[in-house]
Image (cartoon, rainbow, N blue to C red):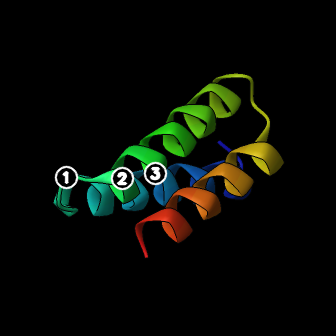
Amino acid sequence: MTPEQTKTADKMKSVKATWDKAPAGPKKDAALKHYQAADKANTAKNDVETNKELDAATHALA
């Protein structure tokens, strides 16, 4: 894996851990949609889109 891919994978893990700890509700639901989109983009090896969705998921949980 390239350093960028490693960074993205670490960010995915971090956002997932934050999501797991979040209380149920509309913020968690919104973050899940972004996380799923990030996972799909990550599968397609689109780091830019993955990071964009992870940032959106983090923002939704804030």
**Cβ–Cβ below 8 Å for labels 1 and 3?**
no
Q: Nearer the viewer, residue 44 or 56?
A: 56
User: Label 2's element?
Assistant: helix
- Amino acid on which the number 2 mark rests in the picture: Pro
- Distance between mark 1 and mark 2 Cα atoms: 7 Å
Q: Nearer the viewer, residue 27 or 13?
A: 27
Of labels 1 and 3, earlier in sequence is: 1
As drawn, which residue projects farthest toward the front? Answer: 26
> In x, y percent, where is residue 15?
42, 58
> In x, y percent, where is residue 26?
36, 52
* Residue 13 shown left or right of residue 9 in the figure: left
* Residue 42 shown left or right of residue 9 in the figure: right
User: Label 3's element?
Assistant: helix
Quick one: label 2, few (<14), some, or many (20+) residues within 10 Å? few
- Amino acid on which the number 1 mark rests in the picture: Ala
The quarter in which the C terminus is drawn is bottom left
Q: Nearer the viewer, residue 7 or 46?
A: 46
> In x, y percent, where is residue 13?
39, 52
Q: Which residue is mark 1?
A: 24
User: Label 1's element?
Assistant: loop
Q: Residue at x 55, y 70 (%)?
A: 59
- Amino acid on which the number 3 mark rests in the picture: Ala
Q: Which residue is mark 2?
A: 26
Mark closer to the observer (1, 3): 1
**Cβ–Cβ below 8 Å for labels 1 and 2?**
no
